[in-house]
Image (cartoon, rainbow, N blue to C red):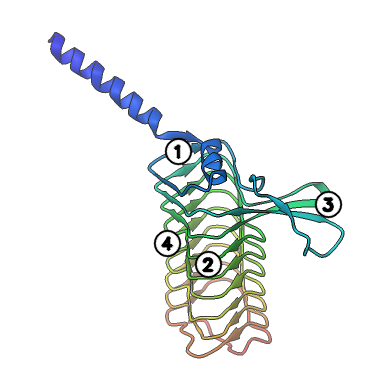
Amino acid sequence: MKNTVLSILLALVFASIAQAQKEISAKEIIQKINLKENVSYQNVVITGDLDLTRLDNSQLDTKNKGDNKRYVSQVISEIKFTNCVFKGKVLAHYSEERNITSYKTDFLEAATFINCTFEEAASFRHTKFFKQTNFSNCQFQRKIDFRHTSFNQASTFYASEFNEDADFRHTSVKETFDFNNVVFKEEADFRHVKFPAYQNFSGSIFNEFADFGHTTFKKGVDFSNVQFLKESDFRHAYFAKPSNLENTRFDGETDFKHANIKPTKD
């Protein structure tokens, strides 16, 4: 009996130690990035805000036009997070009050976030991803900001879920940009995005307002089996051929004014 109790106690102790080992500080990640080390974590909980805007290599952007100052940090190493939970904010962009000074971060190598949970807001506004970017099967529990973000190589948000607003206005896309089987629980904004390759939104669900005003699908788009459960706006959108709207569901009001196609509801 004593041996059994002792075994249980030891198991609990080791389980507690293992659990503690799975929690790391965001500061530890920043330290690795500043040392130009590749970052790779799996099954860990990241505590604190992961603020990438004040890296050691941050420099004033002398090419930035206007009266405001902008500082740019660069993540030179490859980063990869798998099955991780970010407890704090993830910041690759930050603006001080009245936008007098802003800070942004560029990723020079591949950036991978697979099956990760972002519990707080995340901002990648004005960020440049120079290599492949993977946000597949992620949970964004707060607002996500990708306004004016540049994706220079293939990128994917396959099967991710956005629980609050997803803002992709004026995003610059150079190659494929995968959004199939994605769930948008709040507003999704893709205004003024030009998709250069055949764009995949198949199987996605838009629970609230979906805005594709002035969006261009240069080589067509796959909206098959997509559900627009509330209002959707496609004013001035351009759909090149082939564009697939098979089994697309429009439950709310739709606006295709000045778009080059006029789909009808079933």
- Lower position in the chain sequence, tag 1 or tag 3: 1
The amino acid type, in three-letter code, at marker 1 is Val
Circles 3, 2 touching at the beta carbon (< 8 Å): no
**SS label for mark 3:** loop
Could you tell me how far apart the alpha carbons at marks 2 and 4 are, in whole angstroms? 18 Å
Please name whichever residue, 157 or 134, is drawn nearer the observer in this view of the structure: 134
Circles 1, 3 touching at the beta carbon (< 8 Å): no
Residue 218 image position (x, y, % from top left): 56, 85
In the displayed structure, 34 sits above or below 223; it is above
In the displayed structure, 4 sits above or below 25; it is above
Could you tell me how far apart the alpha carbons at marks 1 and 4 are, in whole angstroms? 21 Å
Identify residue for label 1. 45
Q: Looking at the image, is mark 2 or mark 4 nearer the viewer?
A: 4
Could you tell me how far apart the alpha carbons at marks 2 and 1 are, in whole angstroms? 34 Å
Name the mark on residue 159.
Answer: 4
Q: Looking at the image, is mark 3 or mark 2 nearer the viewer?
A: 3
In the displayed structure, 61 sits above or below 49; it is below
Q: Looking at the image, is mark 4 or mark 3 nearer the viewer?
A: 3
Q: Say whether residue 194 is visible.
A: yes
- Lower position in the chain sequence, tag 1 or tag 4: 1
Identify residue for label 2. 229
The amino acid type, in three-letter code, at marker 2 is Leu
Q: Say whether residue 47 is visible.
A: no
Give the residue drawn at x 81%, y 47%.
97
**SS label for mark 2:** loop
Is 15 left or right of 7, judged from the image as shown?
right
Q: Looking at the image, is mark 1 or mark 4 nearer the viewer?
A: 1
Crowd tier of the residue under label 1, counting other residues whose Cα lies within 10 Å: few below 14, some 14–19, many 20 or above: many
Identify residue for label 3. 100
